[in-house]
């Protein structure tokens, strides 16, 4: 069993924010792979299904971003999921819009959701699917950029990216992150 966590800001008023691309990715995965309905658990919303023959629990913490660990850690403990079977899907400023990188461990790079997960587990050694949202160019504009909604012009690459992540995620289950990144890149590159 694996736990895939989308990091984002809960609430309908935040639904289209760049910070919520992790939530968007999990919603697309749940839809594409016909997971069960979302329900409230572990201070979040969860749904379950199977991908590539393995049970996957999706979790969207409904805490504040900087409190995400207080949703993720109890879920992992209750479900007896080890740290190396946990993957956080999150926005990444340091990647161009639509780019994806997968890595295990590392720093939080200023991401409060990752930082709080590291605090809750006393370790950074969980997987991350870093979903590029691009940098606004100057550090003074980061807060507004991250908490701002995706523009209409972003819709094409965003939709293509979310579809590619959902289609390629069986490769994550099979522990083939490099192939996952390659497949997503091939599908999302401009024609």
Image: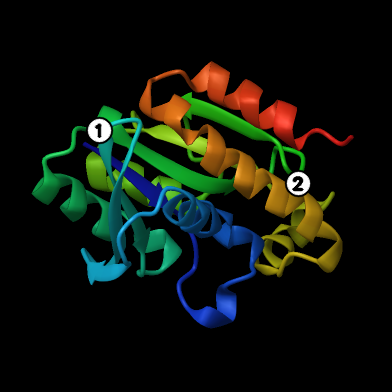
Nearer to me, 160 or 107: 160
Q: Is residue 6 above or below residue 145?
A: above
| Residue receiving disc 1 | 83
Q: Is residue 175 above or below residue 163?
A: above
The local crowd at label 2, few if under 14, some if 14 to 19, many if 20 or more residues have their Cα within 10 Å, is: some
Where residue 159 sits in the image (x, y, percent)?
Answer: 70, 53
* In the displayed structure image, the side of residue 137 where residue 119 appears, left or right: left
Q: How is the image coloured?
A: rainbow
- First of labels 1, 2 by sequence position: 1
Nearer to me, 101 or 156: 156
User: Which mark identifies residue 18?
Assistant: none
Nearer to me, 54 or 71: 54
Q: How many marks?
A: 2
At a point 57% along the width and 72% down the height, the residue shown is 15
| Residue receiving disc 2 | 134
At a point 11% along the width and 40% down the height, the residue shown is 80
At numbered mark 1, what does the secondary structure look like: helix, strand or loop? Answer: helix
At a point 49% along the width and 68% down the height, the residue shown is 9
The local crowd at label 1, few if under 14, some if 14 to 19, many if 20 or more residues have their Cα within 10 Å, is: some
Where residue 50 sits in the image (x, y, percent)?
Answer: 30, 42
Mark 1 near mark 2, Cβ–Cβ under 8 Å?
no
State the image quarter where residue 37 is shown: bottom left
Q: CA–CA distance between discs 1 and 2? A: 28 Å
């Amino acid at each position: 069993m694996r736990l895939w966590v989308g990091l984002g800001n809960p609430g309908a008023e935040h639904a289209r924010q760049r910070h919520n691309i992790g939530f968007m990715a999990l919603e697309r995965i749940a839809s594409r792979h016909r997971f069960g309905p979302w329900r409230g658990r572990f201070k979040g919303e969860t749904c379950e299904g199977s991908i590539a023959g393995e049970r996957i629990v999706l979790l969207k913490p409904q805490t504040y971003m900087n409190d995400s660990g207080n949703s993720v850690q109890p879920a992992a403990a209750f479900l007896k999921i080890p740290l190396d079977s946990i993957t956080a899907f999150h926005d990444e400023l340091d990647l161009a819009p639509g780019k994806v990188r997968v890595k295990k461990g590392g720093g939080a790079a200023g991401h409060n959701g990752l930082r709080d997960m590291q605090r809750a587990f006393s370790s950074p050694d969980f997987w991350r699917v870093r979903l590029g949202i691009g940098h606004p160019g100057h550090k003074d504009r980061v807060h507004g950029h991250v908490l701002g909604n995706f523009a209409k012009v972003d819709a094409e690459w965003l939709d293509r990216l979310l579809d590619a992540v959902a289609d390629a995620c069986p490769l994550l289950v099979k522990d083939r992150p490099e192939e996952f990144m390659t497949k997503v890149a091939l599908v999302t590159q401009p024609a």
